Image (spheres, grey):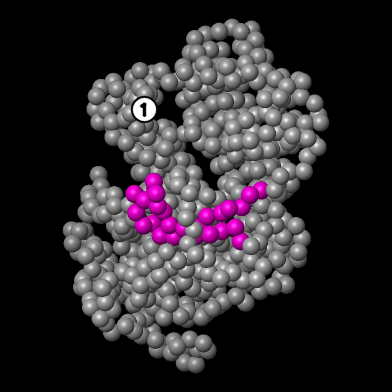
Amino acid sequence: MEKIIETKICRYCGASFDITDKDLEFYEKVSPVFPLSQPFPQKEKGVEENLPLNWREDVIPAKGGIYENEKIPSNDSESEWQFSEQRPVSFHETGLNWGKSSNFEESGLKKYLIPPPTLCPHCREQRRLSFSNPMHLYKNVCWKCGKEIVSRFFLNSWFKNYCNECWSSEDWNQLEYWIDIDFNKSIFEQINYLIKNTPFQNLIWSASNVIHNSVYTNHTSEIHNSYLVFEANTINNSFYWFALKKSDYIMDSCFIWNSEYLYECVDCYDMFNSFFSRKSFWCKFSYFLDNCYNCSYCIACSNLNNKSYHLFNEPISKEKYNELIEKFKNYSLLIEFKNKFNLFTQNSIVKSSNLVGSENCLWNNIINSNNCSLSFDVLECNECKYCTNVNYSDDLFDISSYGEESWKMYESVSVWRYSHNILFSSIVWKWENLIYCIDVKKSRHCFACVNLENKEYCILNKQYTKEEYEILVPKIIEHMMIPPKSPSIEGESWAIVKQGEQEWWEFFPSSLSPFGYNETVANEYYPINTPPIPHPFPKKEKGNNSCLFSFSLGGKDAWKADRGTFNWSTYEAPFPKVEKIIPASKLPENITDIPDDILNWAIECEVTKKPFKIIKEELAFYRKHNLPIPRRHPDQRHLDRMSLRNPRHLYTRKCDKCGKEIQTTYAPERPEIVYCEECYNKEMY
């Protein structure tokens, strides 16, 4: 049982959140360790010699990340000073044994303790996800060779991008973009310079030799013959989906593991030849399943286990089963049946949380895991907290997306396979000891670096020796612990750190993201509902036609308080070149009546009116499985699937069977009949 040490107030939204003894143990575990500071070797070119740790006499320095009496500048005057009202908890106040820290100093090492966060879990996740853009692809041009490419950046954006071939070539030096550390500026400001000036890889692929015939994919590895696939690995012949692992022939689905031949499925594991199903495991040859286990040849069933040939949870004959699935060729009959199924599931019992084969876990969609609390979409993990969409990993806190086969990571997003000791970073994979890095691959011992690969002991993209690195990084951390002397300009896109804010232990501010907020996963889980009002742009360079502008929240979103400055994209995709456009309502009802010529048409989405095309492999899939052509744009289909998932939010309500208090992703006002796990198991088994 975790012991609450402190209840804090989020400095963004004002919500309260708890810090427990287990939290403090984790922060201590992942805190970086460096040798006690020594002078630089004499005549180190470009680096100030014997730079003291504490170069500002007006501030009492932090000791090991803990502020006992540190003064910070007053908001009223630079000459007046005040004590910090909300300092990090001192470990000796917790009643825990933190004597290990002094032992480090006795052995010539110093641990730079990461104190508790200043933001609540939701605000921390929103900030991280504002750096994650896996699903928006654009036609662009490689800045190096000039050829047309598919990119995560739109044409004429502020950011350089190289095609994968140029990125991997040996005729350019990634380290030519280095800058020296400037202790008169914030570290985030210097990282922002690198973001604006270093070349990005056009797409996030693990390695070009394991991506085959899958140009229109992003955040993927080991993928073959696939199209519009995102955040996935080890897959083949799949189209239009998000978050898929070790699966083949998947169409229009999300959050799928170890499956084959699925269509319009959500949150399914180890499934085969199944369609329109959600939260189901080990099922095959079935349609419209909800929370079913080990079922086959079933249609429109909910909470069913170990059954075959059932319809609405009642037995049917094989002939009746075949008769029904024959009707699903027809679009109108399929939609009519889908509506009946949705009404049926509304009256079904639901379990408070979807936990499978897991112990001591809390939140939703956690499979074969242990001690994972306040986490969502977790597969085979241990000792995780505040994590989403991670698998096969241990010791993770505040990690969003992936994290496969990794350990000891904190406050990072899009961390890929085989990584450990990762702090405050975005899009990194393979290797270790990366702190405040963005788009860094196969590297280790790097601090505040952007767009590097196969490097070590780098700071701000400059190469150092191991000894130099271990001297300079602690000095930078101490610098990041001190609030800036003068306030930054509120409301400007270059306002990186505000008065009274330290940088150390905080993730990058959203204003540094190279993507518009509406391009990122953040807008999916934390949507901004009011039209953003742009701040004045800095004067643009000639020829810069960027579609990004900056804004702060207001209007209906003003309750979210000051979350800093975001970017917003106004990019609009060009109209596709096609022979003709057909409204979705004019498509033939039956898949057998669809001509081959549909591959040359554009279909007008029945909801958004956006045009979309059918590709050859997609049409073959529909014909093989007797499924009608979809009437909605792929983006709208993704939104429809995501609406079937419960929100990433925990509510307190009572079990509708025994009346005890439970925590669940079903809000109290929702109509579902929600049982605690004990009551649900008694009812179902």
Q: Is residue 455 visible?
A: no
Give the quadrant of residue 111: bottom left
Question: Is 572 contained in the magenta span?
Answer: yes
Q: Is residue 134 left or right of residue 363?
A: right
**Location of the N terminus (image quadrant):** top left
Residue 636: % across, % down: 58, 36
Residue occupying image coordinates x 29% and y 49%: 15
Frontmost residue, 39 versus 314? 314
Residue occupying image coordinates x 78% and y 39%: 578
Q: Residues within 10 Å of mark 1 (few under 14, many from 20)?
A: few
Q: Which residue is mark 1?
A: 670
Frontmost residue, 30 versus 602? 602
Q: Of helix, strand and loop, which one carries label 1? A: loop
Position above or below: 473 against 87: below
What amino acid is labelled 1 in the image? Arg
Residue 617: % across, % down: 74, 35
**Location of the C terminus (image quadrant):** top left
Position above or below: 423 against 399: below
Question: Is 97 contained in the magenta span?
Answer: no
Residue 645: % across, % down: 47, 34
Residue occupying image coordinates x 74% and y 34%: 581
Q: Is residue 292 left or right of residue 215?
A: left
Residue stretch in magenta: 546-573
Residue occupying image coordinates x 21% and y 73%: 82
Give the quadrant of residue 79: bottom left
